[in-house]
Image (cartoon, rainbow, N blue to C red):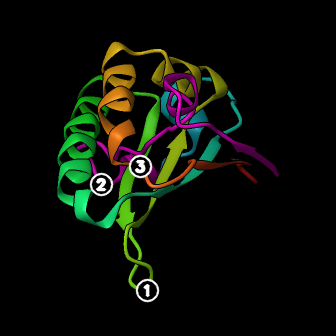
Amino acid sequence: MQIARASQSQEGVKLLATSCLRGNPGLGMLPVKQMFGKEQLMIGVVATLKVQPEKSAEFEKVFLDLAAKVKANEPGCITYQLTKSRTEAGVYKVLELYASEDALKAHGGTDYFKAAGAAMGPTMAGRPEIEYLDGVE
């Protein structure tokens, strides 16, 4: 496991990755080989985001718009889900699953991801913590 800490700068926010379960509930159950025609190692991402509690609604609006764009445009993103802590105000975790390293890189390179990162920056209460995970099969 590798943990990377990102700054609040736009470059740091670029490291955030997210999750998208396409309209087909069975898609997440298929082996990556069947979905994309070749063996690839899935990449998981857990991003912990600390948001100023009074700016939670603004953050959620920006993030949910981003998530809709990810789901509509990134077939290599299998899961992209924002979750909210039940015990810590302003703490969110983004659960992401990508079919490959290339899919993860493509996600971070999109214009809508960069724009969302810039829009979320002022709502943040601290640096994002990003954990990258390798799929085990």
Closer to the camera: disc 2 or disc 1? 1
Closer to viewer: mark 3 or mark 2: 3
Q: Are marks 3 and 2 in contact (CB under 8 Å)?
A: no
Amino acid residing under circle 1: Thr
Q: Earlier in the sequence, mark 2 or mark 1?
A: 2
Front position in the image: 17 or 73: 17
- Comparing 99 with 81, the one in front is 81
Q: Which circle's residue, 3 or 2, is located before the other in the chain?
A: 2
The residue at the point 52 percent across, 26 percent down is: 36
Which residue: 36% across, 56% down?
A: 82
Local secondary structure at mark 1:
loop
Element at label 3: loop
> Mark 2: which amino acid?
Pro
Residue drawn at (40%, 16%), measured in percent from left and top? 110
CA–CA distance between discs 3 and 2?
32 Å
Of residue 114 and residue 36, the one placed in the foreground of this image is: 114
User: Does the magenta run of residues contain 68?
Assistant: no
Q: Which residue is mark 3?
A: 124
Task: Let me know if residue 8 is in the magenta part.
Answer: yes
Residue 1 appears left or right of 4:
right
Q: Position of residue 85 (x, y in %)?
A: 41, 75
Q: Nearer the viewer, mark 1 or mark 3?
A: 3
Q: Nearer the viewer, residue 137 or 87?
A: 87
Q: Main secondary structure of the magenta part?
A: loop
Task: Give the magenta-colored segment's residue range.
Answer: 1-29
Task: Name the residue beneath numbered marker 2.
Answer: 25
Quadrant position of residue 5: top right
Residue pictured at 24% horizontal, 64% vertical = 54
Compared across the picture, whether 40 is left or right of 16 comes to right
For residue 87, the mark is 1
**Percent position (x, y) of residue 56?**
25, 60
C-alpha span from label 1 to label 3: 18 Å
